[in-house]
Amino acid sequence: MAPPVSKRIKTLSVRRPIIYGNTAKKLGEVRPENAPAEHTHLWTIFVRGPQNEDITYFIKKVVFKLHETYPNPTRVVETPPFELTETGWGEFDINIKIYFVDEANEKMLSFYHRLRLHPYVIPGPEGQQNPARNITVTENGEIRSTFYDEIVFNEPNEEFFKTLMTKPGNLLPANITENQVFSRQLEQEEIDRIDIGMTKIDEEIKKLRDELTNTIKET
């Protein structure tokens, strides 16, 4: 007889942050075995916790769907770290599917990440060159294209909720470090930028409304 289904907790949501993306570096004289001659970069695609903490209590496996030119393009990673390393020469969209632990009884999550091998610098003040948004370059020339997101479990079942509560929630560190580009500091800066943007939009709306009112009065 099948075990009873755990009841879901109404009006409750639990968030768990993740970081996903890729790193890439130009191949040197020492090349991985069996790397095709035309391949120029070594890259790694990953899904992990904000501080590399254990996320297997809610993630069962991650499936990476590579470009069809790769042998066996669908790669399944069932143990941590949830990452895949390959070589290549071009950029393409990688489909990432996250499967949750059985007790969660949650649907698989599917999304895409654009593999980045180059920094795509943009001009800055006084001739300064800056990498494009979400791309950083380390001192040794490694490209890092990373994104922060939060998985939201709406109305989790009771058993899974107990499991989620055994962990602190994968909290972000307070400040940015060399190995951690996402932090509460960056989060607050983003909130501040959004607030400034919303204030400017409100000012523009008020300005246009006043202009429209004056035009109507004049007619």
Image: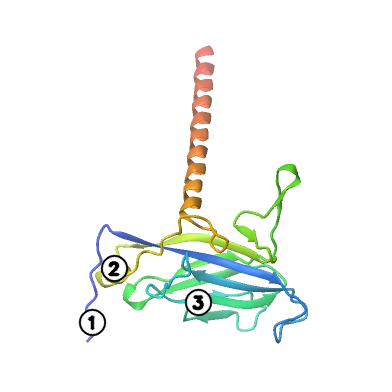
Residue denoted by label 3: 81
Residue mark closest to the camera, 1 vs 3: 3
- Local crowd at mark 2 within 10 Å, few (<14), some, or many (≥20)? some
- Separation of residues labelled 2 and 1 (CA atoms): 17 Å
| Cα–Cα span, label 2 and label 3 | 24 Å
In the displayed structure, 95 sits above or below 177; it is below
Q: Earlier in the sequence, mark 2 or mark 1?
A: 1
* Sequence order check, earlier mark of 2 and 3: 3
The quadrant of the image that shows the N terminus is bottom left
Calculate the distance from the C-alpha at mark 1 to the C-alpha at mark 3.
Answer: 31 Å
Give the labeled residue for mark 2: 161
Residue 62 picture location, percent across and down: 48, 75
Residue 61: horizontal and vertical position, in percent?
A: 45, 77
Residue 213 image label: none
Q: Position of residue 108 (x, y in %)?
A: 43, 71
- At 48% from the left and 78% from the top, the residue drawn is 80
* Amino acid type of the residue that numbered disc 2 sits on in the rendered structure: Phe
How many residues crowd around disc 1 within 10 Å: few (fewer than 14), some, or many (20 or more)?
Answer: few
State left or right for residue 42 relative to residue 216: right
Q: Residue at x 75, y 76 (%)?
A: 28
- Judged left or right of residue 37, residue 177 is left
Q: Which is more foreground, mark 2 or mark 3? A: 3
Three-letter code, disc 3: Pro
Give left or right: position of 50 versus 8: right
Disc 2 or disc 1, which is closer to the eye? Answer: 2
Check contact, mark 2 vs mark 1: CB within 8 A: no
Task: Label 3, secondary structure: give it.
Answer: loop
**Residue where numbered disc 1 is placed:** 3
